Amino acid sequence: MHTQDYIELENQYNAHNYHPLDVVIESAQGAWVTDVDGKKYLDFLSAYSAVNQGHNHPRIVKAMIDQLGKVALTSRAFRNNQLPLLAKELCELTGYEMMLPMNSGAEAVETAIKAARKWGYTVKGVPNGEHGQAEVIACADNFHGRTIMITGMSTEPQYRFGFGPFTPGFKTIPYGDAQALTDAITPNTVAFLVEPIQGEAGVHIPPEGYLREVAAICKRNNVLFIADEIQSGLGRAGKLFAHQWEGIRADVVIIGKALSGGLYPVSAVLSSKEILGVFEPGDHGSTFGGSPLACAVAREALKVLVDEDLFERSRELGEYFKGRLQRLESSSIKEVRGRGLFIGVELYPEAGGARRFCEALKDRGLLCKETHQHVIRFAPPLVIKKEDLDWAYTQIEDVLMNL
């Protein structure tokens, strides 16, 4: 079977909820992938930052295979010997007192919101009543997942159309506007949920000092500052967490994606004992969350990030690559922005949309993805070699200058 054969099968039998580029990947290693026809491509998306450590990192693969030979799943009805070690190592690395493991990023976001609401009722003293009055503030253009509750926070019409009614208890304010947060807070506000970098919206970086200011506003008003670091964290933006660029510490951090190096769905919520301690047995759970397989994989994925200094590597290579892109004199480019190896190239509407550029780059062996019509998102694995970045730049330059 060849590329077109697989595309036809997928179009016939799979729900059409994605519009992927027409490349059918069969294998991968490091920053490179190979399709079913034997053509190699440089991966410049990293499965939306899930493979920061590179595809099939040998140490993480070995940890997964070793654990598969012992036990993969126990459920949380019983204890296993990997969960306590992951909890200890993750808390020591990040400086938080507790973690709660889940699977997908969306599940971790839901977990953080449940924790914030119960904290609001049991600690802050928000009136509970028949339906509860806790409020969570989110930002316009956010992307926190696809569940009904999370979709209700979205301001993207397509994400909402046809899926209501939505869960109450949320407000949205403009991203980057600290005064809007102050104006939106009421005595019933329990949390402010924000992406330190809005990835799906187009790699939007907030104004300098914004995160520091909103963190202070939250502290003054006894509101939890929740940082969604699912895509921007674990080295993607050049630090352990993207919000650390402003020297602050979120009350709650949500992580996922690269927490497993892309080999298994693993996510987690990090916070203090005061906040995560509101959960009692039976309040929340997951059959696969915290499984021995998930924990063994996550433990090694974290060790790879630290041992290979991928945070600093992302910062250095990101500055280098973003600098080259910013010097590219193309009439199609409106702005180049980003932190670490998390870079967005916004095009003028007159350029005809980012999709056609991504398709042209795919034909040259470089895989990236458009977001919100006019932005090309570049997010290669953090293990990428500098010479591969240079090769990618040559393809990008030629396409943006001549298409």
Image (cartoon, grey):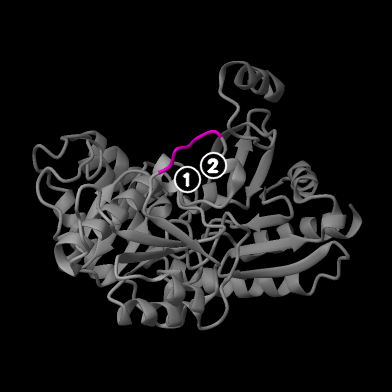
Q: CA distance from mark 2 to mark 1?
A: 6 Å
Q: In this orientation, which residue lies closer to the viewer: 396 or 243?
A: 243
For the magenta stretch, what is the residue range? 162-166
Q: Is residue 233 visible?
A: yes
Q: Residue at x 86, y 66 (%)?
A: 330
Give the mark, 2 or 1, whose residue is nearer the N terminus.
Answer: 1
Residue 371 position within the rendered picture, expressed as x and y whole percent measured from the top left: 66, 51
Q: Residue at x 60, y 57 (%)?
A: 201
- The relative height of residue 359 versus residue 8 in the rendered view (above or below) is below
Q: Residue at x 43, y 81 (%)?
A: 212
- At label 1, the amino acid type is Thr
Residue 267 position within the rendered picture, expressed as x and y whole percent measured from the top left: 33, 50
The residue that mark 1 highlights is: 151
Count neighbours of disc 2 (C-alpha within 10 A) and say few if under 14, some if 14 to 19, many if 20 or more: some
Locate residue 274 relative to residue 337 in the image: left or right: left
Q: Residue at x 34, y 64 (%)?
A: 253
Report which quarter residue 89 is drawn in: bottom left
Q: In this orientation, which residue lies closer to the viewer: 80 or 126?
A: 126
Q: The N terminus is located in which quarter? A: top right
Residue 303 position within the rendered picture, expressed as x and y whole percent measured from the top left: 32, 61
- At label 2, the amino acid type is Arg
Report which quarter residue 213 is drawn in: bottom left
The residue that mark 2 highlights is: 160
- The relative height of residue 394 versus residue 156 in the rendered view (above or below) is below
Residue 170 position within the rendered picture, expressed as x and y whole percent measured from the top left: 41, 56
Count neighbours of disc 1 (C-alpha within 10 A) and say few if under 14, some if 14 to 19, many if 20 or more: many
Q: Please say whether residue 172 is one of the residues in the magenta stretch.
A: no
Marks 2 & 1, CB-CB < 8 Å contact: yes
Locate residue 272 relative to residue 79 in the image: left or right: right
Q: Is residue 147 visible?
A: no
